[in-house]
Image (cartoon, grey):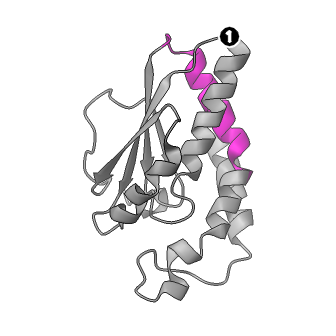
Amino acid sequence: MRRLQIQQAMTMATASSANVYCTNATDKQISYANNSSLQKKVQLKTRPFLEDTIKDMLSKMVHVPCIKVADLGCASGPNTFFPTCEVMDIIASVCRQAHWESPELQVFLNDLPQNDFNTVFKSIPAFNGKPCFVAGVAGSFYQRLFPSKSIHFVHSSYSLHWLSK
C-alpha cells in the first residue's frame, strides 16, 4: 500500500515535466545540478511516508549510538544532502518526543563512479557541527555495496527505476 502511494506521488509530481535531463550532461544548462527542482518537489511530497518508515524503524530498534543510512543514487547537485537532512530531522524529532538521546548518523552516499563526488565532498563543510559523518560509495547497486546487516536505513529517490531484477 505504501509503495503504491509513493509511486502515485512520484507520478503526480513528474507528470508535468516534459523534459528529461541527463544527470551527467556536458551541457551545464541541462545538467541535473541545474534541473533538479522536480526531484526536490517529489521528496517533499513523500516526506510523510519517510516519517512513518523512520518512526517504525526506530520503534523496533534498541537504542544504537550510530544509525547508518545509505542514499542510493545520490547524484551531485542541490538535492544531494536534502534526503540526509530530512532523515536527520525526523530522527531528531522522534528522539526528542521519546526523550531519547539522538544518535549520530553515518551516511553513505552512493552513485555510479561517474558521479562528481568531488563536488559532493566540497559541500560537506556545510554539514559541520551536525552529528553526521559522510562517506562516498561509488558503484552500481546491481552489485553488493555494503556488508551484511551494516545499514539501518536505505533511501533512494529517482534511481530504483533503473533496477531490472
Q: Quadrant of the N terminus?
A: top right
The front one of 108 and 6 is 108
Where does the image place residue 111, in percent across and percent down from the top left? 36, 58
The front one of 6 and 25 is 25
The front one of 131 and 143 is 131
- Say if 14 sits above or below 56 in the image: below
- Secondary structure mostly seen in magenta is helix
- Say if 122 sits above or below 37 in the image: above
The image quarter containing residue 79 is bottom right
Q: Quadrant of the C terminus?
A: bottom left
| Residue name at image x 50 percent, y 31 percent | 131
Where does the image place residue 18, in percent across and percent down from the top left? 67, 83
Is residue 85 toward the left or the right of residue 24 in the image?
right
- Say if 135 sits above or below 111 in the image: above
| Residue name at image x 68 percent, y 10 percent | 99
Number of on-image labels: 1
Is residue 47 toward the left or the right of residue 34 in the image?
right
SS for callout 1: loop
Q: Residue 57 magenta-drawn?
A: yes
| Residue name at image x 64 percent, y 39 percent | 50
Where does the image place residue 95, in percent across and percent down from the top left? 64, 19
Q: Amino acid at mark 1?
A: His
Where does the image place residue 142, in percent across and percent down from the top left? 29, 54
Q: Which residues, given as a range, are shown in magenta?
A: 45-63
Is residue 2 toward the left or the right of residue 149 in the image?
right
Q: Residue 60 magenta-drawn?
A: yes
**Residue 152 visible, this angle:** yes
Q: Which residue is mark 1?
A: 99
